[in-house]
Amino acid sequence: PVILKTAHLPLFEKYKQFNAIFTDGLVLENKTGAGLLFKDQKFKFRLPNTASIFTAELFAIQQAILRILEDRSVETRHH
């Protein structure tokens, strides 16, 4: 993780005015889930066991997009 973080430091610095969002989908022991980290908030989702890893990854990305849109809507209302 330290090497990965060090490798990405120039990108984090270049885009520091933006919020980093991390997404993940996983299948573990026949259980499927997705999660994301957005503005220091963790979101976890349980998906049907039949969902594929691709579905889990896309679901996490979709949820991230929904959070971005919701956040932009709130910011617009406050300005």
Image (tube, grey):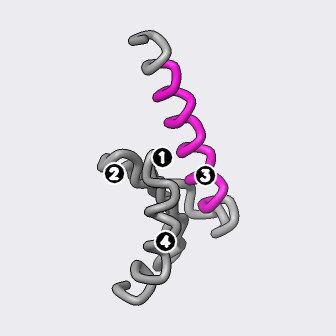
N-terminal label among 1 and 3: 1
Q: CA distance from mark 1 to mark 3?
A: 17 Å
Give the side of residue 61 with respect to residue 34, left or right. Answer: right
* Residue 17 in magenta stretch: no
Mark 4 belongs to which amino acid?
Pro
Give the side of residue 35 with respect to residue 65, left or right. Answer: left
Q: CA distance from mark 4 to mark 1?
A: 14 Å
Q: Which residue is mark 1?
A: 18
Q: CA distance from mark 2 to mark 3?
A: 14 Å
79 or 30, which lies in front?
79
N-terminal label among 4 and 1: 4
- Judging from the image, what secondary structure is the residue with disc 1 in? loop
Q: Nearer the viewer, mark 2 or mark 4?
A: 4
Residue lying farthest to the left in this orientation: 40
Residue 42's label in the rendered image is 2
Above or below for 61 versus 68: below
Q: Which residue is mark 4?
A: 10
Q: Residue at x 56, y 56 (%)?
A: 48
Tell me where the magenta segment starts and ends, as one range.
56-73
- Judging from the image, what secondary structure is the residue with disc 2 in? strand
- Judging from the image, what secondary structure is the residue with disc 4 in? helix
Residue 77's label in the rendered image is none
